[in-house]
Image (cartoon, rainbow, N blue to C red):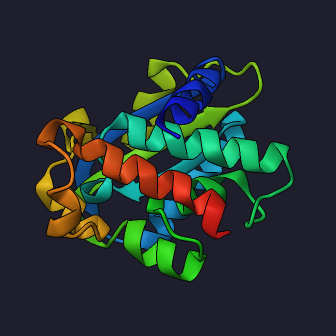
């Protein structure tokens, strides 16, 4: 399963994919999401935002994008949009009503992970990323994407599960949850 996920991620790398971390204050969650989605629509790419405290490295989100993209290609998607399918996979959950509160952003100060994705030939370049961050009043900080034991706990991975692997393989526990969404759908 691990080898299969890695080959899927390599496929996504040929698409235009940017994963960034940021910090900032979110005074109005709905307005924040509306501004982000309007910017994505204007620039013709897919955007999804996450609470970065539940992200265990860029590979976590690369895997979610790969699985979600494949689900749409094979008509096995659960949601109506690729952005929401990415959220579903990233959460390791089968239902949006569980995935949204788990992985979604929250009002107030926090860490944000952003996926910018295009299956078309649209280049997502640094000036666009900076313009988006300015619009959302965020400061880029990719270190918020690094996971740790607290990330695993917030994600719902027990201490017992953590003890099944060495610390340098903790990310695999998250990647398994992402891959399992295909099975539990």
Q: Is residue 35 visible?
A: no
Q: Nearer the viewer, residue 153 or 160?
A: 160
Residue farthest right in this picture: 75
Residue at horizontal 54%, vertical 51%? Answer: 179
Along the horizontal axis of the image, is 177 left or right of 173? right
Q: Residue at position x 64%, y 17% from top?
A: 14
Count of residue discs = 0
The reply to whether residue 81 is in sight is yes
**Residue 62 at x, y percent in the picture:** 49, 36
Left or right: where 181 falls relative to 172: right
Q: Is residue 134 above or below residue 148?
A: above
Classify 120 as above or below 32.
above
Instruction: Name which residue lies at 76% across and 59% down.
Output: 77
Pick the quarter of the image with the C terminus. Answer: bottom right
Instruction: Give how far across and how far down residue 70 sits, in percent.
Output: 73, 42
Residue 123 coordinates in the image, percent (x, y): 63, 18
The answer to which quarter of the image holds residue 60 is top left
């Amino acid at each position: 399963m691990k080898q299969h996920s890695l080959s899927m991620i390599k496929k996504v790398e040929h698409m235009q994919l940017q994963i960034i971390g940021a910090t900032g204050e979110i005074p109005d969650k709905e307005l924040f999401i509306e501004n982000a989605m309007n910017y994505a629509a204007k620039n013709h790419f897919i955007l999804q935002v996450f609470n970065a405290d539940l992200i265990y490295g860029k590979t976590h989100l690369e895997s979610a994008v790969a699985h979600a993209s494949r689900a749409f290609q094979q008509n096995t998607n659960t949601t109506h949009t690729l952005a929401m399918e990415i959220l579903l996979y990233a959460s390791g959950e089968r239902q949006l009503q569980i995935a949204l509160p788990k992985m979604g952003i929250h009002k107030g100060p926090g860490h944000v992970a952003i996926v910018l994705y295009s299956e078309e030939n649209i280049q997502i370049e640094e000036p666009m990323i900076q313009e988006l961050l300015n619009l959302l009043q965020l400061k880029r900080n990719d270190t918020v994407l690094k996971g740790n034991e607290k990330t695993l706990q917030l994600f719902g991975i027990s201490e017992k599960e953590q003890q099944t692997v060495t610390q340098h393989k903790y990310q695999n526990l998250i990647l398994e949850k992402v891959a399992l969404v295909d099975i539990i759908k």
